[in-house]
Image: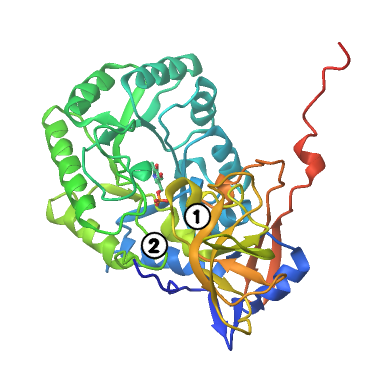
């Protein structure tokens, strides 16, 4: 497959040098060191506004709301920015809920999802008064009912439908097939709603579905949407009223060879189908993650060594699979560019990290004109980058910086090695 540099907002190249908005990436690498995640505030705002314009009707009324999927990038500065733009939040853990509360988000703008919520997480979500809990199984529904009873309240819930639709994406990020662990099987949804309606501490408020991530075609969404709208129709006949329809997230981004639909066009297509089928009165929720932040971030890394192997050349850099897991996990492609164009002939390298795993690679067969000490930018790293980082090999996670115009802000310190074992204890002599 041939790849090119994805078209980016917020990151540009001028005369061979890369910038995040008005700040050169070299200046950031010098000031904060590498590996370093760099985010562009402008890129996040632009992507958010592309959704938002489609969410407002010509008469100014709102026909859909954006609940940012925090799992994509949960840095507080990112959450705060999106909150200021008007986003609600889609959360999948008590930790994410705590983050959203920390930036002052209104619990009524939050939906709490996830296939394995603990009792403590359910209690936390209900006590702060989230808009809705998306329920993924009958045992979970029963648990929510009894926790709500103990708190003396009624829990607002949606059922997450597994529509059995193929999102045509990587199998690890497909969630709407009947083999996936997510959601309630399509054939069981009506029965489950009827059971939910009989539970005294459950308030049915909506219906939810999410079919996968990095989806580059609108058609699987329309298939899932039609199936969910059919269910709402049937529920109405049973006297069960649905107030909101949550269509999940999952819209893909261009990593260099992908052609996802334009965000505004995509949103219009879905919302028009909702209107055409007579459901325009429903409050619609979209939960994008990657398409808001994925192309708003890069990972900077410095070349440590250039090594000639028997069959391959290796460009060994100081970022690794623990910093950006997507290549090792999904065989994912990220474009990699020198932040200042080098002199000399490009050589084909595998770009690899220092971690002791052959799976520790960031890019394969990349033509690069680089020298030791040069800094590379791994593009499209704003989503599922830092959030998936680990401390494997006792490596501190990178610092994160957000750029706004010609100002850069350190929004997370680099982790020190001492902090990695601060919570550990030896057991002493035996
Ligand atoms: N909503 C739910 C329920 C999800 O599971 C996910 C991702 O897995 C998302 C939203 C966000 O998906 P994406 O980042 O692909 O937009």
Residue 417 in the image: x percent, y percent?
79, 44
Q: Quadrant of residue 429?
A: top right
Q: Are marks 2 and 1 in contact (CB under 8 Å)?
A: yes
Looking at the rendered image, the quarter that the N terminus falls into is: bottom left
Q: Can residue 302 be seen?
A: yes
The residue most toward the right is 429
* Name of the residue lying farthest toward the top: 430
Name the residue carrying label 2: 253
Disc nearer the start of the sequence (2/1): 2
Q: Is residue 44 visible?
A: no
At 48% from the left edge and 62% from the top edge, which residue is drawn?
334
Residue under the point 65% across and 40% down: 392
Whole-percent x, y for residue 107 in the image:
50, 40
Q: Is residue 40 above or below residue 99?
A: below
Snapshot quadrant of residue 54: bottom left
Name the spot of residue 95 as percent of width and height, x first: 58, 36
> Relative to 397, is 168 on the left or the right?
left
Residue at the image point whose x is 36% and y is 67% from the top: 257
46 and 390: which one is in front? 390
Residue tagged by mark 1? Answer: 383
Q: Residues within 10 Å of mark 2 (few under 14, many from 20)?
A: many
- Ligand 1 contact, mark 1 (Cβ < 8 Å): yes
Q: Secondary structure at mark 2?
A: loop
- CA separation, marks 2 and 1? 10 Å
Q: Is residue 419 above or below residue 268?
A: above
Q: Residue at x 26, y 35 (%)?
A: 162
């Amino acid at each position: 497959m041939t790849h090119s540099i994805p078209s980016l907002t917020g990151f540009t190249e001028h005369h061979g040098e890369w910038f995040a908005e008005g700040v050169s990436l070299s200046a950031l690498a010098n000031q904060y060191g590498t590996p370093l995640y760099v985010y562009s505030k402008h890129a996040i705002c632009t992507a958010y506004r592309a959704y938002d314009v489609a969410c407002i009707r010509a008469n100014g009324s709102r026909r859909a709301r954006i609940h940012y999927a925090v799992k994509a990038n949960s840095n507080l500065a990112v959450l705060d920015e999106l909150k200021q733009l008007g986003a609600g939040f889609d959360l999948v853990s008590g930790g994410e809920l705590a983050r959203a509360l920390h930036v002052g988000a209104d619990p009524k703008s939050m939906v709490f999802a996830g296939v394995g919520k603990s009792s403590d997480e359910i209690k936390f979500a209900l006590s702060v008064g989230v808009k809705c809990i998306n329920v993924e199984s009958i045992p979970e529904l029963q648990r929510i009912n009894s926790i709500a009873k103990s708190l003396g309240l009624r829990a607002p819930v949606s059922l997450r439908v597994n529509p059995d639709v193929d999102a045509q994406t990587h199998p690890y990020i497909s969630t709407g097939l009947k083999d996936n662990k997510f959601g309630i099987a399509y054939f069981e949804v009506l029965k489950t709603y009827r059971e939910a309606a009989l539970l005294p501490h459950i308030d049915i408020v909506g219906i939810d579905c999410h079919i996968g991530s990095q989806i580059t075609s609108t058609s699987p969404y329309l298939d899932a949407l039609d199936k969910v709208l059919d269910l709402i129709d049937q529920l109405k006949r049973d006297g069960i009223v649905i107030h909101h329809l949550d269509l999940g997230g999952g819209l893909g981004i261009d990593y260099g060879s992908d052609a996802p639909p334009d965000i505004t066009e995509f949103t219009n297509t879905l919302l028009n189908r909702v209107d055409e089928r007579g459901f325009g009165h429903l409050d619609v929720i979209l939960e994008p993650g990657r398409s808001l932040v994925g192309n708003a971030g890069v990972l900077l890394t410095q070349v440590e060594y250039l090594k000639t192997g028997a069959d391959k050349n290796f460009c060994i850099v100081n970022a690794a699979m623990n910093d950006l897991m997507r290549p090792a996990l999904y065989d994912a492609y990220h474009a990699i560019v020198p932040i200042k164009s080098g002199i000399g002939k490009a050589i084909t390298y595998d770009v690899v990290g220092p971690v002791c795993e052959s799976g520790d690679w960031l890019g394969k067969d990349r033509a690069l004109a680089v020298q030791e000490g040069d800094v590379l930018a791994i593009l499209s790293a704003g989503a599922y980058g830092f959030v998936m980082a680990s401390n494997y090999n006792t490596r501190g996670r990178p610092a994160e910086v957000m750029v706004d115009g010609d100002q850069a802000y350190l929004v997370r310190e680099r982790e020190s090695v001492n902090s990695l074992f601060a919570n550990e204890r030896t057991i002493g002599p035996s």
